[in-house]
Image (spheres, rainbow, N blue to C red):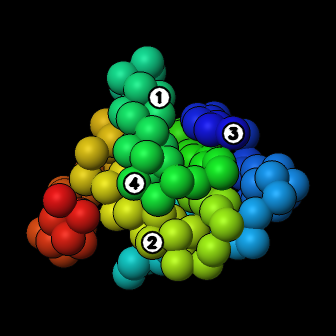
Amino acid sequence: MKIVRISNAAIQPDEGLAALAGLGGGAVSSFTGIARDDGGVTAIELEHYPGMTEASLSSLIEAATARWSLLGAIITHRVGIVPVGAPVVVVGAASLHRAAALEATAFLIDRLKTEAPFWKREHYADGTAKWVDAKASDDARAERWA
């Protein structure tokens, strides 16, 4: 099972994870990223490149599945305006053993942050908004999987 979802709708993290749990493995690992207030942020806005983004995320799942012999993996990512406190992304992996599921989940989120074509703008309480630059720390985390 390999699922990629990109939607303006609110994310329900348990939906995809329940499907992974039903695959008969010994481990399901997940990461849920939540919109946070970084100094007056009230919401974030995410844009993507339709078609290209889905292909990029599918490629990441294929790479993780091959590297860790996963039983399944999901990536669900929200786009549009996301209020602080709401889930932005859910990544999950199912495998026979915990180490593979944990490592694959870390790989998927680390590489997603640097490879998938998403753009983020922060909206502030004073009505202003600012595009967010890529972070060197995200690049460093992704490099560990090279």
The x, y position of residue 33, in whole percent, is 54, 67
The x, y position of residue 102, in whole percent, is 53, 74
Q: What residue type is labelled 2?
A: Glu
Q: Quadrant of residue 87?
A: bottom right
Dot 1, crowdedness within 10 Å: few (<14), some or many (≥20)?
many
Is label 1 in contact with label 4 (beta carbons under 8 Å)?
Answer: no
Mark 2 to mark 4: distance in Å? 10 Å
Q: Quadrant of residue 111?
A: bottom left
Q: Earlier in the sequence, mark 3 or mark 2?
A: 3
Dot 2, crowdedness within 10 Å: few (<14), some or many (≥20)?
some
Q: Which of marks 1 and 4 is nearer the N terminus?
A: 1
113 left or right, relative to 100: left
Mark 1 to mark 2: distance in Å? 22 Å
Q: Mark 2 = which residue?
A: 103
Is label 3 in contact with label 2 (beta carbons under 8 Å)?
Answer: no
119 vs 29: above or below: above
Q: Which amino acid does label 3 sit on?
A: Met
Q: Residue at x 25, y 53 (%)?
A: 114
Element under disc 3: loop
- Depth check, front residue: 118 or 81: 118
Q: Mark 4 = which residue?
A: 67
Q: Mark 3 = which residue?
A: 1
48 vs 33: above or below: above
Q: Which of marks 1 and 3 is nearer the N terminus?
A: 3
Q: Which residue is drawn at 70% across and 72% down?
A: 27
Mark 1 to mark 4: distance in Å? 20 Å
The x, y position of residue 131, in whole percent, is 26, 51
Q: Mark 1 = which residue?
A: 54
Q: In which quarter of the image is residue 124?
A: bottom left
Element under disc 4: helix
Q: Which residue is drawn at 38% across and 44% down?
A: 63
